[in-house]
């Protein structure tokens, strides 16, 4: 939700939510609502499935998952934030399980490997603004 948008998230059954404040560009005022379970997932590179959540200028927000043994996510050099929702991902420095937040700076291009049944949230193109 853009700055100034008033909302009250809830779940009748209970849930865990990720709150990331101040993530919108000043000129991005679009409110987006999406069912990620039934969304329009597309097959991407190297066995991953991708769901585009939001884009604005160079910023891209999406989810990626794999049902295979592994899938490689290319990380561009514009800076990347990754939140591991389920499963695990790995890079040359280690393995990161569900609940891990990764923030790679501009110029960082190390790929991430999604392990079987993993789901991640990704945001790119916003750290160089």
Image (tube, rainbow, N blue to C red):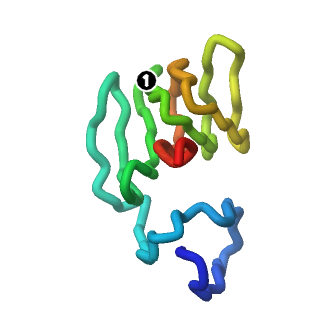
Crowding near pointer 1: few (<14 within 10 Å), some, many (20+)?
Answer: many
**Which residue is disc 1 drawn over?**
71
Name the residue furthest top: 92
Nearer the observer, 13 or 74: 74
Residue that appears at 45% across and 52% down? 61
Q: In this view, does 103 lie above or below 4?
A: above
Q: Quadrant of the N terminus?
A: bottom right
Examine the image and state in which quarter residue 3 appears.
bottom right
Name the residue furthest front: 129
Residue 75 position, x and y percent, is: 48, 28
Examine the image and state in which quarter residue 107 appears.
top right
Q: Is residue 88 above or below residue 126?
A: above
Examine the image and state in which quarter residue 34 appears.
bottom left
Q: Is residue 52 above or below residue 116?
A: below
Residue 126 position, x and y percent, is: 52, 48
Residue that appears at 63% across and 32% down? 104
Residue that appears at 46% across and 47% down? 63
Q: Is residue 25 above or below residue 113?
A: below
Residue 57 position, x and y percent, is: 37, 55
Mark 1 secondary-structure assignment: strand
| Number of marks present in the image shown | 1
Residue 19 left/right relative to 38: right
Residue 117 position, x and y percent, is: 51, 34
Residue that appears at 61% across and 46% down? 85
Nearer the observer, 115 or 125: 125
């Amino acid at each position: 939700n853009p700055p100034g948008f008033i909302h009250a998230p809830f779940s009748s059954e209970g849930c865990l939510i990720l709150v990331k404040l101040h993530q919108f560009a000043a000129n991005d005022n679009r409110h987006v609502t999406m069912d990620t379970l039934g969304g329009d997932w597309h097959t991407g590179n190297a066995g991953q499935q991708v769901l585009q959540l939001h884009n604005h200028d160079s910023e891209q927000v999406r989810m990626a998952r794999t049902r295979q043994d592994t899938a490689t996510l290319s990380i561009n050099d514009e800076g990347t934030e990754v939140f591991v929702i389920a499963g695990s991902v790995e890079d040359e420095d280690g393995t990161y399980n569900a609940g891990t937040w990764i923030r790679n700076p501009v110029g960082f291009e190390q790929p991430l490997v999604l392990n079987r049944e993993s789901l991640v949230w990704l945001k790119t193109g916003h750290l160089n603004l």
